[in-house]
Image: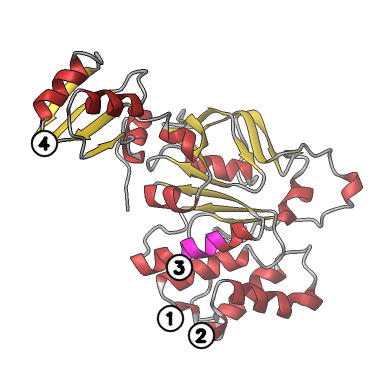
Amino acid sequence: MTSRDEVVFGRPARAAEDAPRAAANCALSSAGLSKRFRSGQLAVDSVDLAVPTGSVYGFLGPNGSGKTTTIRMLLGLIQPTAGSYEVLGLPMPDGLPYALPRVGSLVEGPGFHPYLSGRANLARQDAADRTANPATASARIDAALGRVGLLAAADKRYGAYSLGMKQRLAIATSLLRRRELVILDEPTNGLDPQGTREVRGLIRQIAADGTTVFLSSHLLAEVEQICTHVGVMRTGRLVFQGTLEELRGPGAGRVVVRTPRPELAAEILGGELQLADVRVSGLEVSAELGSILPETVCERLVKAGVPVAGLETPRRSLEEEFVQLTGEGFDVD
């Protein structure tokens, strides 16, 4: 099997009625999924994934946190040491011949031939899939190239492609057939800003067509811009899983007031309202909200004669949330 190519396997899918019974609502799921290498390193430790069907799931963590190892287990490229998992609701590994024809993937480095054109490289990948219909290969290849915006460059040698074009061609291999799930491991790694924008736009298009996208990344910008759900890895363990809003946490923990009378505002916040950690900085006063509503703070200040020029309840940034969860900084661009 060639890395960063569509998953190819050794036998055609059998009739759907012969497949193991599929579970609903999750495109990917696991229970206690673990991998310990012969060296003794525990790369993945009891991961319980739940990737909702139709979501764009950001699988995040610092480099070396176990993301790629987890993906390789989910695709059947390596065997887990412990635990169980399902792909498109089918238990693995028995469900591999039924599930993998419905899955596209992009893992590790592109395995294309630099002297062949983009079209010829896709043709080689398609021919390696025993479940693909050769009679429709040409039409499917053109459709995949069009979907990633490479039809105009289809006959150009792969070696002359830009990095962004190479990544888009790699994603095209996972789109040669209709897919219910696409798994992408660091799809924007090493790209310049333009190539990154191109790939992000393509991921949005794939998701808009109803395909579940499982996106491994260490870049916060990808999460904020395209993901609906998030799983955060730290040293082999899944330390958070939920929606992007849940990751951001509950409402703001602090209130910030802008006023020409900051000392009086501080007196009201810390005295009458009994808010903790009152801080004054120029014409701004901030404090921990606790259980008091922001509108109550504004009302009390105005009644006390404090002119309120502005009031906001900033939430912690995603970067701050990640640092708290993982103990490490993340790339933010």
Residue type at mark 2: give it. Answer: Lys
User: Which residue is identified by label 3?
Assistant: 198
Residue type at mark 4: give it. Answer: Pro
Label 4: few (<14), some (14–19) or many (≥20) C-alpha neighbours in 10 Å: some
Residue 211 in the figure: left or right of residue 161: right
Label 3: few (<14), some (14–19) or many (≥20) C-alpha neighbours in 10 Å: some
For the residues marked 3 and 2, what is the alpha-carbon distance in whole angstroms?
A: 19 Å
In this rendering, the answer to whether 166 lies above or below 288 is below
For the residues marked 2 and 1, what is the alpha-carbon distance in whole angstroms?
A: 7 Å
**Marks 2,4: beta carbons within 8 A:** no
Q: Which mark is residue 160?
A: 1
The residue shown at (23%, 28%) is 302
Identify the secondary structure beneath mark 4: loop
The nearer-to-camera label among 3 and 1 is 3
* Magenta stretch, residue numbers: 198-204
The location of residue 140, given as percent across then percent down, is 71, 74
**Marks 2,1: beta carbons within 8 A:** yes
Magenta segment includes 112 = no
Magenta stretch, overall SS:
helix
